[in-house]
Amino acid sequence: PSFPAASPHVLSVSATDPAGNSSAFSTANAAVDLAAPGEQVVAAVPGGGHARVDGTSFSAPIVSGVAGWVRDRRPDLDAGQVADLLRRSAQDIDEPGFDDDTGFGLVDLPAALDADAPRPDVLEVNDDIGWVNGEFLGSPDPYSWDGGRRGAIMRASADFLKDPVDVYRIRVPANRRVRVLVKPLRDDQDPDLEVFARSAETVFSSRGSVGESVREAGRSDVVRFTNRLDFTRQYFVAVYVPEDAEALNAEYTLTVRRAR
């Protein structure tokens, strides 16, 4: 994949010709989200006037304009919801379903304006410990679970390329055992689970890990652990899509509660 197009939380755009086919010069890979016209596009040129031009440099602004229009007309949606909305409402123009040439399909403004709002992906950006513990943003995220008798249930999604990991900050009372469960919403999806102690600096290292579950697609993953200290302690829960997963994205429910 090419960067920054393949970076997390970025919409990657490929080009199509006037007939709606993928342009030969357009990069094809699993990071492509959408397609837009990129050949014979009428554009202003230096010195005045207009010309017909080719390139993904003209496809990306079309998608940017569509995204801006949707945000103006649907101000209740956050940026992540708008991106998901554009993916889900796109016209499928190549191989059925997602493909490396055109992603989810040709961007479709009318469809995006009328489509149902996607569920928000809670607490984004939460791609590593530094995003939720205050290191990057100055103040930590609220605890996703505060250690109370009532458990916490969150529904979110992860994507191997565009949202590789979701990290949640939890608080565990002294000498309390905890059960953390992640359940995929579809049988072909494979969200895995790992829990880290407060000493961990990143979820991309095993240092500070207190438990991990990596069951196959369609199965729930569970980690049970105990805070053996005599005071309340902070932990981090990471949900991620493994590199060898058949489906690169995964919608899931995460449940954190006291264990018996």
Image (tube, rainbow, N blue to C red):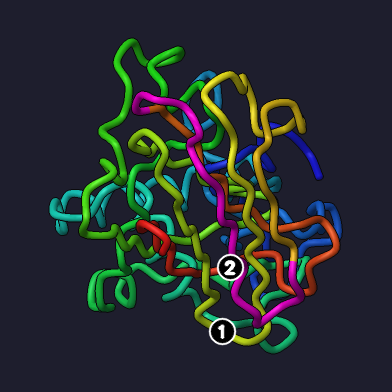
**230 within the magenta span:** yes
Q: Is residue 52 visible?
A: no
Q: Residues within 10 Å of mark 2 (few under 14, many from 20)?
A: many
Q: Earlier in the sequence, mark 2 or mark 1?
A: 1
Q: Is residue 61 left or right of residue 103?
A: left
Vertical order, 169 against 69 (above or below): above
Image point 42% across, 71% down: which residue?
Answer: 108
Q: According to the image, label 1 marks what residue?
A: 186
Image point 46% across, 52% down: which residue?
Answer: 63
The segment highlighted magenta reads 215-232
Name which residue type carries label 1.
Arg
Vertical order, 95 against 190 (above or below): below
Vertical order, 132 against 163 (above or below): above
Q: Considering depth in this image, is 17 or 89 the residue closer to the camera?
A: 89
Name which residue type carries label 2.
Ala
Are the residues at dot 2 and dot 1 in contact (C-beta closer than 8 Å)?
yes
Q: CA distance from mark 2 to mark 1?
A: 8 Å
Quarter of the rendering containing residue 20: bottom right
Image point 67% across, 47% down: which residue?
Answer: 211
Q: Residues within 10 Å of mark 1 (few under 14, many from 20)?
A: few
Quarter of the rendering containing residue 40: bottom right
Residue 36 location in percent, x, y?
Answer: 57, 60
Q: According to the image, label 2 marks what residue?
A: 250
